[in-house]
Image (spheres, grey):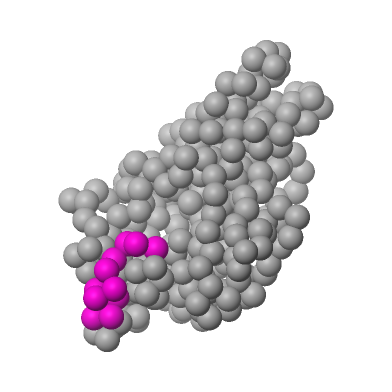
Amino acid sequence: MSYFITTDATIDLPLSYFDKDFHIIPMSFVLNNTEYGIDKFLSCKEFYAEVRNGSKPTTSLITTYFTCENLRPILEAGNDILHIAFSSGLSGTYENAVIAVDTLRAEFPERTILLIDSKGASTGEGMQVYLAMQARDKGLDIHENYKYLSDLVDNICYYFTADDLFHLQRGGRISKAAAIAGTLLQIKPLMYCNINGKLIAIDKVKGRKKALLWLVDMLCEKALKDRDDQVVFISNADCVEDAEFVKNKITKKTGRTNVHITDIGPVIGTHCGPGTVALFFIGDNKISPKDETLKNL
């Protein structure tokens, strides 16, 4: 019996990466009093142009009802579902998915519905979807694929650097004074997703180039080299030249050619802001320094 791989619209991977038996649950965002993401859409370029001009988008959770409405037709067609959800450490969307899955299991007791907490977002979450689809293509059944992802989730490394401190200030992550001082001094925050799927500030450096090179250094230090499923993704929020810089450095230092560049879409872009560059790969472990906050910026 076939099974679908489903996920949320936070994976930041273009549909060209996916083919059959796959479904994304849409997630809306509001920009300039207009809702996008369900019936109306905005390109990444258009979205970031509005944000750079001062617009303040907002997002909302994917509700239990909406999750059920998206998954029910797949089950009615006789398919099982492996659902990979947005991090429980970043959104209540995962908890709503748990309730939805319990509801649908009661409605369809003959079907198998399995749920993975990605403990991440953007293309780190998308990377798990990508690998799950590759594993399915190799013949893993739904239970084998679930175990594969469950064993993998804590080894997906997420490293970020943001460029727009005023966007972080508008989002309440740092004070206005810190944003002004950091911008004047060209301070760039360095962040990662910890084992609980929460976004944590690790450190800060002076200058954009140093921040981008830090991403490269983290991959060189932590990426597992002997995995057949190793793949590298670099996401960017309207700064593809910086993503290309990181890719070229990675290729030069490691010889890796399986490095993919993707766009950070409006849902995640609402929270990280333009100029963010993020790096994702399979590592030996997620680093867990003492959790800090950007208030120390």
Does residue 28 show up? yes
Residue range corresponding to the magenta coloring: 171-181
Q: Is residue 122 above or below residue 67?
A: below
> Where residue 33 sits in the image (x, y, percent)?
62, 64
Residue 177 belongs to the span the image colors magenta = yes
Q: How many marks?
A: 0
Residue occupying image coordinates x 51% and y 63%: 270
Please name whichever residue, 227 or 247, is drawn nearer the observer in this view of the structure. 247
Image quarter of the N terminus: top right
Please name whichever residue, 192 or 72, is drawn nearer the observer in this view of the structure. 72
Image quarter of the C terminus: bottom left
Quadrant housing residue 79: top right
Q: Residue furthest front?
A: 33
Q: Residue furthest bottom?
A: 184
Residue occupying image coordinates x 58% and y 78%: 49
> Where residue 81 sits in the image (x, y, percent)?
66, 30
Does residue 230 show up? no
> Where residue 285 sits in the image (x, y, percent)?
32, 46
Residue 38 belongs to the span the image colors magenta = no
Q: Is residue 112 above or below residue 158?
A: above
Q: Is residue 11 left or right of residue 275?
A: right
Quadrant housing residue 204: bottom left
> Where residue 26 sits in the image (x, y, percent)?
66, 48
Residue occupying image coordinates x 77% and y 43%: 20
Residue occupying image coordinates x 46% and y 69%: 273
Q: Is residue 58 above or below residue 277?
A: above
